[in-house]
Amino acid sequence: MLKKGKKIAIRIDMTPMVDVIILLLIFFFMTSRFAEPEVVEVTLPEAAAGVKIPTGVNVIIVEADGVVYLNNRQVDRDQLNDGVKAIRMTNPNARFVIKCDRDADFGIMLTIFKDMQAVRATRMILSTLKESGQW
């Protein structure tokens, strides 16, 4: 006769899996960056070539009617120059992205480029959209 023994229940230890999930959550919380939404929406021009825009840059937005924003604050031409100078004083290697509406006057954009060159802010990128079928 065989003795009937107690059945041993097989259990999977969930502790390591919970540890991994917590570590993944911590990783995503620490590496995610919450970007401030832009105040103004502009229709960017299209281009066949382009550069990926880096993070942590200062944004200059030009609306179709010529209104200019520096880092989501509306500024006039003198305030733009002073703001760019102040940014460059704190960080000489500051980078700027210029988002100019496709319907804006081209002269405004040229004026902004000249003003930025005058304050020696030469690290700038003109933001564009990808043309369909390119890249």
Image: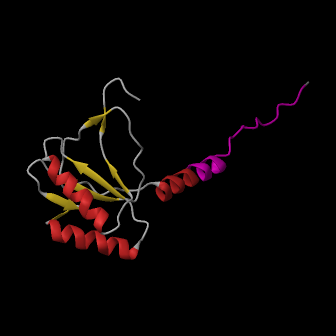
Residue 1 shown in magenta: no
Q: Residue at x 34, y 31 (%)?
A: 48
Relative to residue 59, is residue 90 drawn left or right? right
Q: Quadrant of the C terminus?
A: top left
Main secondary-structure element of the magenta-colored stretch: loop
Q: Residue furthest right?
A: 1
In front of the other: 3 or 67: 67
Asked which colour scheme the image uses, the reply is secondary structure
Q: Position of residue 92 (x, y in %)?
A: 42, 71
At which x and y percent is residue 104?
13, 46
Residue for point 49% across, 55% down: 31
Residue 87 x, y percent position in the rendering: 33, 71
Q: Nearer the viewer, residue 116 or 134?
A: 116
User: Magenta residues, as a range?
Assistant: 2-21
Horizontal relation, residue 22 to residue 131: left or right: right
Position of residue 66 relative to residue 80, above or below, is above
Asked where in the image residue 58 lies, by quadrant, the reply is bottom left
In the rendered structure, does residue 10 fall within the stretch colored magenta?
yes
